[in-house]
Image (cartoon, rainbow, N blue to C red):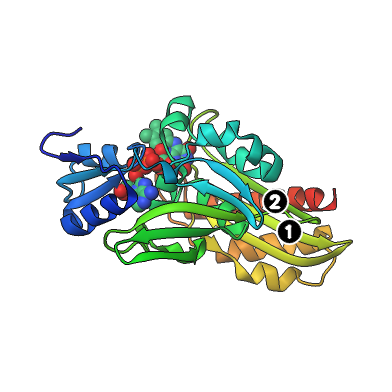
Amino acid sequence: MPHGLAYHRPASLGEACALLAELGEEALPLAGGTDVLVDLRRGAGQARHVVSLRDLEELRGVRLEEDGLRIGALTTPAELAASEVLQGARPELIEVVQVFAGPQIRNRATVGGNLCTATSCADFPPLLIALGARVRLVGPDGARDLALEDFFVDARKTALGPGEVLVEISVPARIPGEGARYEAFGLRAGSFITVAGVAAVLRLAGEVCLGARVVLGAVGPTPLLVREVEVLLLDRAPDDDALREAAAAATAAALPISDVRGSAEHRRDVVRALATRALVTARERARS
Ligand SMILES: Cc1cc2nc3c(=O)[nH]c(=O)nc-3n(C[C@H](O)[C@H](O)[C@H](O)COP(=O)(O)OP(=O)(O)OC[C@H]3O[C@@H](n4cnc5c(N)ncnc54)[C@H](O)[C@@H]3O)c2cc1C
């Protein structure tokens, strides 16, 4: 723990929310610490207290309920990959784990932390948004649910209010005729920071598209849900021409920057390639 920080370990969710509300902007929730401790050691931010969530059992585990999956915010990528429930219900989410860091971070990081840190290159948000995930936030004034796309307000800024904790993520169960895929591009094999990522979900009835969601990661301040793709594909046959047009719409919606990992122009080319691949795989899966 960086020097000068007070460490708190509440035993219940109510206690954690009350403590966070009381300490205000000087306090940060602590999950796996793989983002927050790096920032604090760099001297970023004004936190003087960290409030560990580790004893909050209600934030753990993956379960299947009638209306879909519930993923506790403290679930690690390694636990997701090992979950038989997830393997059966949403195997596409396990593919995200396969491009997520290396074994040490997969064992320590949490899915909730990946959403709350709200960095543009985070790997879980694009596919979760494309699948229609919702998040449950609990704070001193009770609980509220919101669509994951509305949770991201700006770069590193979420809709979490004072004293609020992300408790769980709910993901609708797979329906027949639906296919999904996340594609990410990095600069090396093994652990990489995503230069661009694209998630695609297609819903087909025979050869007619009933729904399409494409979400871009790492090419904007927040994950970008490209609503034009749904308009473009709705009620159409998802043939190669239609998917190429959809990939072009996704590319046009990207808001990339140039940095050490690539120029904006390069990122646009990457988005087009990833969107095409993700849509083609989603189509194959929807057909099968
Ligand atoms: C070497 C390395 C490799 C990495 N590789 C990847 C990668 O491939 N892909 C990727 O997406 N990320 C990667 N990351 C980033 C990081 O591991 C993830 O973002 C991780 O999921 C964050 O989770 P955490 O539990 O460690 O969050 P923490 O560091 O504990 O918290 C992150 C932020 O979220 C807040 N927070 C956490 N949980 C909650 C909650 N339940 N409610 C409210 N606020 C909360 C904290 O206050 C903090 O602001 C990597 C990091 C490192 C160090």
Image height of 17 relative to 71, above or below: below
Q: Residue 121 location, x and y as percent? A: 46, 48
Q: Please state which of residues 202 and 77 is positioned toward the viewer in this rendering.
A: 77
Asked if residue 231 can be seen in this view, the reply is yes
Q: Which residue is mark 2?
A: 180
Callout 2: CB less than 8 Å from ligand 1: no
Q: Which mark is residue 65?
A: none
Ligand 1 placement by image quarter:
top left
Image height of 270 relative to 87, above or below: below
Q: Is residue 173 left or right of residue 288?
A: left
Q: Is residue 257 left or right of residue 62?
A: left
Q: Residue 137 location, x and y as percent? A: 41, 59
Number of labelled discs? 2
Q: Quadrant of residue 132?
A: bottom right
Crowding at mark 1 (Cα within 10 Å: few <14, some 14-19, many 20+): many
The residue depicted at 84 percent of the width and 60 percent of the height is: 239
Instruction: Please name the amino acid that badge 2 sits on.
Output: Ala
Q: Residue 115 location, x and y as percent? A: 44, 51
The residue depicted at 63 percent of the width and 60 percent of the height is: 214
Q: Please state which of residues 48 and 9 is positioned toward the viewer in this rendering.
A: 9
The residue depicted at 56 percent of the width and 64 percent of the height is: 225
Q: Which residue is mark 1?
A: 202
Q: Quadrant of residue 33?
A: top left
Q: Is residue 216 left or right of residue 220?
A: right
Q: Is residue 106 left or right of residue 198?
A: left
Asked if residue 261 can be seen in this view, the reply is no
